[in-house]
Image (cartoon, rainbow, N blue to C red):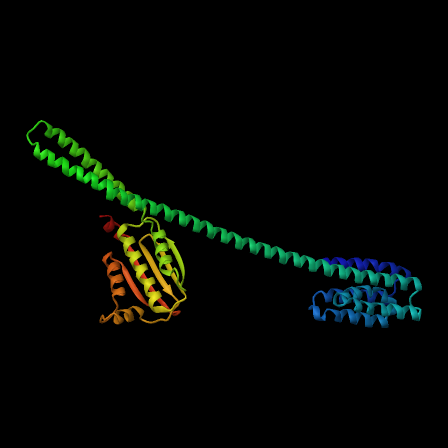
Amino acid sequence: MERIADKLIVLACCAGPLALVGTSRASVCMMLLAMTCSFLAELLPARVSVAPAAACCLVALALPEGSVFTALAAYDLARSSPALSTLAALPVFAAGWSGALAPGAVVSSLLVCASAAALSLRADRALADRAGNLRYADELRERELVLEARNRELLDAQDYEVRLATLSERARIARDIHDNVGHLLTRAVVQTEALRVVHAGEPVEGDLEAVGSTVREALDEVRTSVHDLRDDASDLSVQVRAVVERACEGTSLTPLVEVEAGEVPAAVASCLLAVVREAVSNVLRHSGAAHVSVQLAEHPGLWRLTVADDGAPVARDEVSGASRGFDGPGMGLASMEERVRALGGTFRAGPSEDGGWVVFASVPRRAEEGGAS
């Protein structure tokens, strides 16, 4: 659009030399030809866009009175090279030499040609600067997106570390309460019952029974608190990531963990964690893979676990079982399958279509009731 506007300006400037020459059939034909060649140059590829301008200059040699419109050709010739724009001045000089153009028309036509070439160079620089600005803006946007992605990863990693530390602390508190306070209260219950038996039939027996009941109630409350803390400490997403990261730490295996699961019953969590631990262990020992993907998703009717790698598609667990002296499949696959099927789930393991090895396990939601009971 910018070049079209420039050419309209050049065409308007050609009216000055045309007024000195006067309108004739040759000048009108040359004007139409120059306009056609000029706008045709905008449609052709850059490597051949000078052809219409060169043809216009050749025709202008045959129609000297119309050479005042070669400024449009000068504009297109300057796009390829500023030196080529001087070709548009040749028909003007030829027309002035033959007397077809007055000296004033020759001078004004040359000025318009020079102005057209200058406009063309200015448009080239403006378009180049605009394209450079757009590239720079795209690069800045790309860097911004990369930084945003890294910030999200850092925030996720920070949240993960905080969550892991919180759950570890809760687990430690639960162990301390169970090992210390729980044992002391249990001993208090036993001692109270022993004193009640010793003082059976005495007035103090009723008081000892009340104390024993209170201590037992306190023990039940402590047990409930310990179980609640342990339930909070069993965040499956954190535990799966921790298991995979610990297994891959110090190795060349790159893990990719995607966990989308909410609260999971203890039985289901124990089963899935065992499958993840054994599957990743097999990848490290037998696959020679560079990457392992662990995906755990929660659906309305089941939990789905997939562990895939890009190693050699061999029956690696069978090899591991044979190497340890067992007949048939290795104990790892059998153990994983037994755990999953004990919860009514489905288990498969084998080579993938794209190469590598895939372990798949699904546990139905009804296992939640079994785990809760």
Vertical side of 368 occupied by 20: above or below:
below
- Please tell me in which quadrant of the rendered image residue 59 appears: bottom right
Residue at the extreme top of the image, as rendered: 203
Residue 188 visible in the displayed image: yes
- Please tell me in which quadrant of the rendered image residue 207 appears: top left
Q: Is residue 35 left or right of residue 242?
A: right
In depth, the one of 211 and 40 nearer the eye is 211
In depth, the one of 91 and 305 nearer the eye is 305
Residue 48: where, in percent of width, then height?
A: 71, 71
Residue 204: where, in percent of width, then height?
A: 11, 28
User: What residue sits 32% from the left and 62% below the top?
Assistant: 279
The quadrant of the rendering that contains the N terminus is bottom right
Q: Is residue 218 left or right of residue 200?
A: right
Residue 1 visible in the displayed image: no
User: What residue sits 40% from the left and 47% below the top?
Assistant: 162
Residue 343: where, in percent of width, then height?
A: 24, 56
Residue at the extreme left of the image, as rendered: 201
Residue 165: where, in percent of width, then height?
A: 37, 47
User: What residue sits 9% from the left and 27% below the top?
Assistant: 203
In depth, the one of 61 and 334 nearer the eye is 334
User: What residue sits 79% from the left and 57% below the top?
Assistant: 9
